[in-house]
């Protein structure tokens, strides 16, 4: 069984939303940002997804979800790492995320907790910040190195 990571395609929307629904994660705004998502496919079935919402020089890392059958196998970590690398290669200055359940997972990727009030204003256009994610969610940031 070979797991394939690839960019999301329009036809993947239903499967990505189903993964999110099964995990109790917000689906709002996914369709608008699907071109910035990665998915993991196993024998033709999507088993994981993660995406970026781009806002100026920042992005929101969102919807990191892995099917129960694939948890603990490094799939989520690989997807997060690839999205961090993509953001840096595209010249973004920082990645942000909101989480209610995984605040202890993301520090391994360089994310640190920050106060919600310090989020860049442009991120407030995100469905996640406009109510899809609860106000009690932990906010985290990773600064990205600039490349010449």
Image (spheres, rainbow, N blue to C red):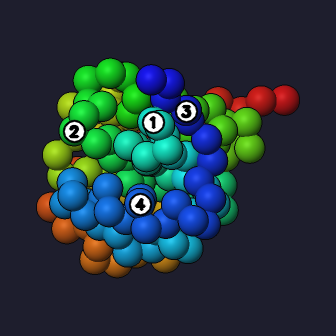
Disc 4 residue crowd, few under 14, some 14–19, many 20+, Cα 10 Å: some
Looking at marks 2 and 4 on the same chain, the residue that comes earlier in the sequence is marked by 4
Find residue 26 and report its horizontal and vertical position in percent: 29, 67
Residue 76 lies left or right of residue 23; in this view the side is: right
Residue 15 badge:
4
Q: Label 3 near label 4: C-beta < 8 Å?
A: no
Task: Residue at 49% x, 66% y: name it.
Answer: 13
Q: Label 3 near label 2: C-beta < 8 Å?
A: no
Disc 3 residue crowd, few under 14, some 14–19, many 20+, Cα 10 Å: some
Q: Quadrant of the C terminus?
A: top right
Find residue 119 and report its horizontal and vertical position in percent: 42, 59
Task: Residue at 45% x, 23% y: name it.
Answer: 1
In three-dimensional space, the C-alpha distance between marks 4 and 1, rounded to whole angstroms, equals 13 Å
Q: Secondary structure at mark 3?
A: strand
In three-dimensional space, the C-alpha distance between marks 2 and 1, rounded to whole angstroms, equals 13 Å
Looking at marks 4 and 1 on the same chain, the residue that comes earlier in the sequence is marked by 4
- Picture quarter containing residue 10? bottom right
Task: Residue at 45% x, 73% y: name it.
Answer: 29
Q: Residue furthest right?
A: 148
Looking at marks 2 and 1 on the same chain, the residue that comes earlier in the sequence is marked by 1
Residue 4 badge:
3
Q: Label 1 near label 3: C-beta < 8 Å?
A: yes
Find residue 98 and report its horizontal and vertical position in percent: 31, 54
Depth check: 35 or 62 in front? 35
| Residue of label 2 | 68
| Residue of label 1 | 42
Depth check: 63 or 117 in front? 63
Q: Label 1 near label 4: C-beta < 8 Å?
A: no
Residue 79 lies left or right of residue 63; in this view the side is: right
In three-dimensional space, the C-alpha distance between marks 3 and 1, rounded to whole angstroms, equals 6 Å
In three-dimensional space, the C-alpha distance between marks 2 and 3, rounded to whole angstroms, equals 17 Å
């Amino acid at each position: 069984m070979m797991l394939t990571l690839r960019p999301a395609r329009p036809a993947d929307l239903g499967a990505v939303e189903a993964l999110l629904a099964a995990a109790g994660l917000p689906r709002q705004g996914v369709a608008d940002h699907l071109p910035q998502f990665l998915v993991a496919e196993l024998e033709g079935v999507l088993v994981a997804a993660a995406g970026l919402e781009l806002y100026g020089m920042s992005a929101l890392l969102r919807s990191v979800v892995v099917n129960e059958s694939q948890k603990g196998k490094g799939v989520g970590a690989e997807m997060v790492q690839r999205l961090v690398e993509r953001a840096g290669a595209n010249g973004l200055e920082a990645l942000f995320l909101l989480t209610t359940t995984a605040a202890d997972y993301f520090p391994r990727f360089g994310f640190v907790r920050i106060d919600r009030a310090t989020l860049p204003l442009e991120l407030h256009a995100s469905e996640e910040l406009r109510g899809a994610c609860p106000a009690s969610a932990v906010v985290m940031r990773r600064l990205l190195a600039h490349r010449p």
